[in-house]
Image (cartoon, rainbow, N blue to C red):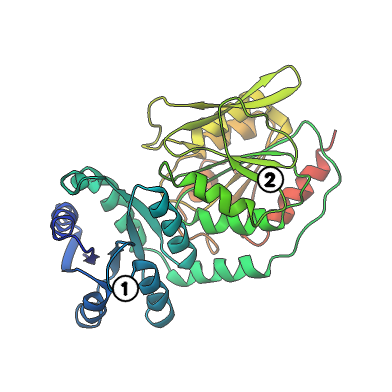
Amino acid sequence: MIDVLVVDDSAIVREVLRRELSSDPDIRVVGTAPDPYVARDMIVALHPQVLTLDIEMPRMDGLTFLRKLMRYQPMPVVVVSSLTPKGGSLSLSAMEAGAIDVVCKPGAAYQVGDIGERLVEIVKAASQVDVSRCARAAASNASGQALALEATTNQVLAIGASTGGTVALEGILKVLPRNMPGTIITQHMPELFTRAFAERLNGLAMMEVREAQDGDSVVPGVALIAPGNRHLVLRRSGARYFVSVQNGPTVNRHRPSVDVMFRSVAKIAGRNAIGVILTGMGADGAQGMLEMLQAGAATIAQDEASSVVFGMPKAAIDLGAAQSVASLDEIPRAIVELCRQRRD
């Protein structure tokens, strides 16, 4: 049984989240709190295993509370945030501070039940997370050393990630050289969040990082991130690679889907591609990575020890799709070495 504490300043939202979570037989909501001060006392008294946390609250905002919590009593936290640009920016800061994942709160309180299935899935995954791994990943980000690479052409780097991926991607992009091959990234993330995420990464990475737009060229020195709620697909016109940003059905319950991106890379770039699958729940990307490998691409999966959630990488490894397995610290150097080996 997973004991959960719900923290939100809206009484309606607290009740809806309590109801949705309690509908699963493996979850027990041990309490609800209207603000971090009440939550602090309830954590001491009730010892919940997972916390769901609103970000924008009176008296003390959720981000400040999260930072205090991770310092004094680390535990898995799932952010339930408003679907707004401000909410997206704050939620990214929360994940950087140690939150496991983020679920978007609809605009109207009575619609919160629509996120119930997704929230249940994330809470279950969060309950299995070793929170110290998040701290290790953040520490690794701070100590990464920049790498160097000779100019490359006609290569594509494709990276897929989910839970824990925001911190992992930050760690990787901060040390990759400015002249990396054209890079495309699918990170499971809601719309309105991906632009803020891309802007954050652009301020940290040596490459240019931006949210992908339909028709953008895939060129060295630029990383394109799939927009929330849209698939990212690689296309080619003559010698030019570009991306298509598409609606379409969810795949593996996700849009954007890593499988959709990887399959397009297998078809369009073949042996000129490198695929990397990072931390995340579920199996999205495993089949697409296998197709990349079969098409001659090089493939890397993050190892269990450095993954916040060893779901997507494990699925790829079990399927035989990962040519190599590496820790988060080792992945950037492995990518650069593969680029050198595969130079035109």
Residue under label 2, please give it. 208
- Kind of residue at badge 1: Met
Q: Position of residue 28 (x, y in %)?
A: 17, 63
Mark 1 or mark 2, whichever is nearer to me: 1
**Left or right: 222 with respect to 149?**
left
In whole angstroms, how far apart are the C-alphas of marks 1 and 2?
Answer: 35 Å
Quarter containing the C terminus: top right
Residue drawn at (56%, 26%) of the image = 214
Q: Quadrant of the N terminus?
A: bottom left
SS for callout 2: strand
Position of 49 compared to 160: left or right? left
Could you tell whether 294 is left or right of 126 in the image? right
Q: Which residue is mark 1?
A: 60
Residue at screen point 24% across, 75% down: 39
Q: Earlier in the sequence, mark 1 or mark 2?
A: 1
Residue 109 is tagged as none
Q: Residues within 10 Å of mark 1 (few under 14, many from 20)?
A: few
